[in-house]
Amino acid sequence: MSTATTAGRATRPRADALRNRERIVTAAREMFVELGPDVPLDEVARRAGVGNATLYRNFPDRGALVHEVVLSVMRRTTARVEEAAAAEADPFAALVRFAHAAADERIGALCPVLSGAFDKDHPELLAEGHRLEASVEGLVERAQAAGRLRPDVAVGDLMVALSQLTRPLPGTGCLDMDRFVHRHLQLLLDGLEAPARSELPGSPATLEDLRTAP
């Protein structure tokens, strides 16, 4: 065996190491949703079924783990857009399919994570964010071009609604509201379908509006 081949194999992550990394990211995403961004990292390791040393070998600090969780959620959500567009010939049906899949990702519950200490302007995150935005905008534009989505809304309206519907409500009396998310999301989506049944106040929420919101 050549030295180059040996070196290449030595630097390539082993399958079990990749599985451990994925388990850590999955556990962190679940626990950030359930308990917030300050969940102890040793609890994340316990849920992932790995030791603390394995977690810190992959993610030396909380910021590194948050970075990977945010990146994973964006990639998964973009994949949901692509799956919906491929599965549905009707562009509005594709939008509906994506919205329900995005709700399952609990993107609103992860909003507190975004205020944490990590590099939000990292090129990898920015690139994946642009890819996600372009994918969702494409769904919205196709549905409007087909006359299936009311013309007085924009992609930001959908993203705001998804964020609000999938963010846990404060107070212990509101802990069991998740079972209503898809029901209330469908009520919203019915209101987005053309022809419009009312005149909306204000102006459509664009992605630029969301970026500049205080």
Image: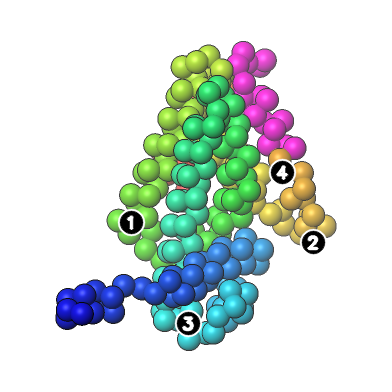
Mark 1 residue type:
Glu
Position of 76 relative to 95 (above/below): below
Q: Amino acid at mark 3?
A: Thr
Mark 4 → mark 2, Cα distance in angstroms? 17 Å
Residue 54, label in figure: 3
Does the residue at mark 1 contact the one at mark 4 (Cβ under 8 Å)?
A: no
The residue sitting at 43% across, 71% down in the picture is 15
Q: Are marks 1 and 3 in contact (CB under 8 Å)?
A: no
Q: Which residues are magenta?
A: 183-199
The count of marks equals 4
As measured in the structure, the alpha-carbon distance from the residue carrying label 2 to the one carrying label 3 is 34 Å
Looking at the rendered image, the disc whose residue lies closer to the viewer, 1 or 3, is 3
Q: Which residue is mark 4?
A: 181
In the image, taking residue 178 as reference, residue 214 lies left or right, namely: left
| SS for dot 3 | helix
Instruction: Tell me the tag on residue 172.
Output: 2
Is 192 included in the stretch rendered in magenta?
yes
Query: The disc labelled 4 sits on which kind of residue?
Result: Val
Q: Nearer the viewer, mark 2 or mark 3?
A: 3
Going from N to C along the chain, the mark reached first, 4 or 2, is 2
**Residue at numbered disc 1:** 124
At 47% across and 57% down in the image, what residue appears? 72
Residue 124 sits inside the magenta stretch: no
Depicted 111 relative to depicted 92: above or below: below
Give the residue drawn at x 39%, y 74%.
Answer: 14
Residue 116 showing in the rendered view: no
